[in-house]
Amino acid sequence: MTPGFAEPVLGAQSSFRAMLHALSHPGRIVALPDVPQAPMPLGPAMAALALALCDADTPLWHDGGAAVADWLRFHTGAPLAPAHAARFLAATGAPPALAGLALGSDEAPQDGATLLLQVSALEATAGWSLSGPGIETTTALRVSGAPLGFVAERAALGALFPRGLDIMLCAGRHIVGLPRTSIIREDG
Amino acid sequence: MAVLARAAADALRPHCAGLPAHTRLRGPEIGLVMLRGRMGGDGAPFNLTEATATRCTVDMAGRMGHATVLGRDMEQAELAAMLDAALQDPALRPALLAQVIAPLAAEQAARRARNARRAEATRVQFFTMATMR
């Protein structure tokens, strides 16, 4: 078992602030100032967001195995839940089918789940072209190691708006916010 | 664990000097716990009050030690957690039980007995017609 944040309150607050920054500028790569040392395969950025977001009232789903389950339950106190009932999902590999997750309701779209998705690398070069609220024209983002068919699967949820899924991409200690309003176009 | 939780930091500190190195996994941090009571011992439970408690978890050579103590003494919580972890080590356990836990338990039992004696000396028996008959 490894410790969580060195400073639990400041670490969680700075990670939450970084996540707000990432979600208000979709596609922009944001570095987390303070990350915990988490058991593999949980990356530093995803571990930091999990600690900042989860508590005893937020059902959590993850695919990291027993060591990750112990670590998350010890440090967050969050109950582990099946994917369709989880408020936060920490996917280190391929996530469950996006349409089967909690997407909120038309009256309470904020009840939709937030998916933390671990990818191998994030670069601000051509690859995906993002547009939508928070982006003046377009933002270029290259994501290495995204699950196959991820962009199409996410785009299919667009018709359900305001219901939907907010996604945080995590790589190393960097994050990128993909709120449900952002539109992704794959270049080339 | 109950013995460690009731022991003051001053009583624990000398015994922790020779223990293996440890890392803090959580805390020590101060919080509140809700104490529940039952009217007359068997009535419906109700929230009596909140009490300040301090908890700490440490890792000592792969063994996790936990402690939750009443009050706000963060050092006491950490020392108790260190001893809890060390007590899980079969090599250290017999010596610690004999040198730390047994004397502390004896002292705490003596203090409880002394307080009980002083309280018992002031007990008042209420006799009513119903019980005298």
Image (cartoon, rainbow, N blue to C red):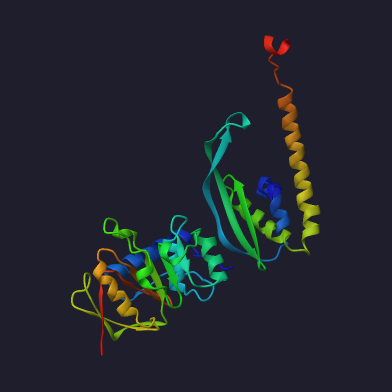
Q: Looking at the picture, how far across and down is residue A102, in whole percent?
A: 37, 63
Q: Looking at the picture, how far across and down is residue B62, in whole percent?
A: 66, 68
Q: Can residue A42 be seen in this snapshot? A: yes
Residue A104 lies in quadrant: bottom left
Left or right of B119, for residue A119: left
Q: Residue furthest bottom?
A: A188
Question: Up-down: is B92 above or below A153?
Answer: above
Left or right of A176, for residue A161: left
Q: Looking at the picture, how far across and down is residue A22, in whole percent?
A: 32, 70
Question: Up-down: is B13 above or below A60?
Answer: above
Count of numbered circles on the image: 0
| Residue depicted at 27% across the width and 68% down the height | A24
Which quarter of the image is occupied by the C terminus of chain B? top right
Nearer to the camera, A46 or B86:
A46
Left or right of B23, for residue A25: left
Q: Looking at the picture, how far across and down is residue A142, in whole percent?
A: 32, 84
Question: Up-down: is B73 above or below B59?
Answer: above
Q: Can residue A27 be seen in this snapshot? A: no
Nearer to the camera, A183 or B16:
A183
Q: Residue furthest left?
A: A137
Question: Up-down: is A182 above or below B32?
Answer: below
| Residue depicted at 22% across the width and 70% down the height | A134
Residue B36 lies in quadrant: top right
| Residue depicted at 71% across the width and 21% down the height | B123
Nearer to the camera, A5 or B42:
B42
